[in-house]
Amino acid sequence: MRRAQFTWLHLHHVIRSLAGEASAGIVAMVLQAGITPKET
């Protein structure tokens, strides 16, 4: 039981960190798109 709980917590932490990386990448893309001139 304890092992399953640990695995669940670890999995949740991994998903959370991956989601954070994904959102950070999206923010970087938006900032890059905002910096580059749209009218080309």
Image (cartoon, rainbow, N blue to C red):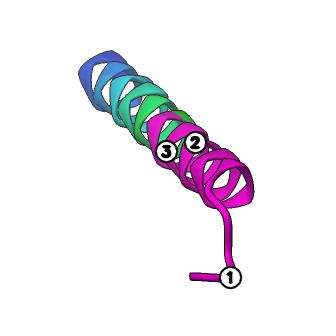
Residue at 74% across / 57% down in the picture? 34
Q: Is residue 11 left or right of residue 37?
A: left
Q: Position of residue 18 (x, y in %)?
A: 40, 39
Residue identifier under label 3: 25
Residue at 61% across / 56% down in the picture? 36
| Secondary structure found at label 3 | helix
The span picked out in magenta is 21-40
Of the 4 image quadrants, the one containing the C terminus is bottom right
Find the distance from the CA under tag 1 to the CA under tag 2: 20 Å
Residue identifier under label 2: 28
| Secondary structure found at label 1 | loop
Residue identifier under label 1: 39
Residue nearer the viewer, 15 or 37:
37
Query: Does residue 26 sit above or below 39 in this rendering?
Result: above
Find the distance from the CA under tag 3 to the CA under tag 2: 5 Å
Residue at 59% across / 48% down in the picture? 32
Q: Are marks 3 and 2 in contact (CB under 8 Å)?
A: yes
Q: Position of residue 7 (x, y in %)?
A: 29, 28
Q: Amino acid at mark 1?
A: Glu
Pair 1/3: label in front: 1
- Disc 2 crowd, CA 10 A, few/some/many (<14, 14-19, 20+): few
- Disc 1 crowd, CA 10 A, few/some/many (<14, 14-19, 20+): few
Query: Does residue 29 sit above or below 7 in this rendering?
Result: below
**Residue 25 magenta-drawn?**
yes
Q: Position of residue 31 (x, y in %)?
A: 69, 46
Find the distance from the CA under tag 1 to the CA under tag 3: 23 Å
Please tell me which of labels 1 and 3 falls first in the chain.
3
Please tell me which of labels 1 and 2 falls first in the chain.
2
Magenta-highlighted stretch: main secondary structure?
Answer: helix
Residue at 68% across / 82% down in the picture? 39
Q: How many numbered circles does the render carry?
A: 3
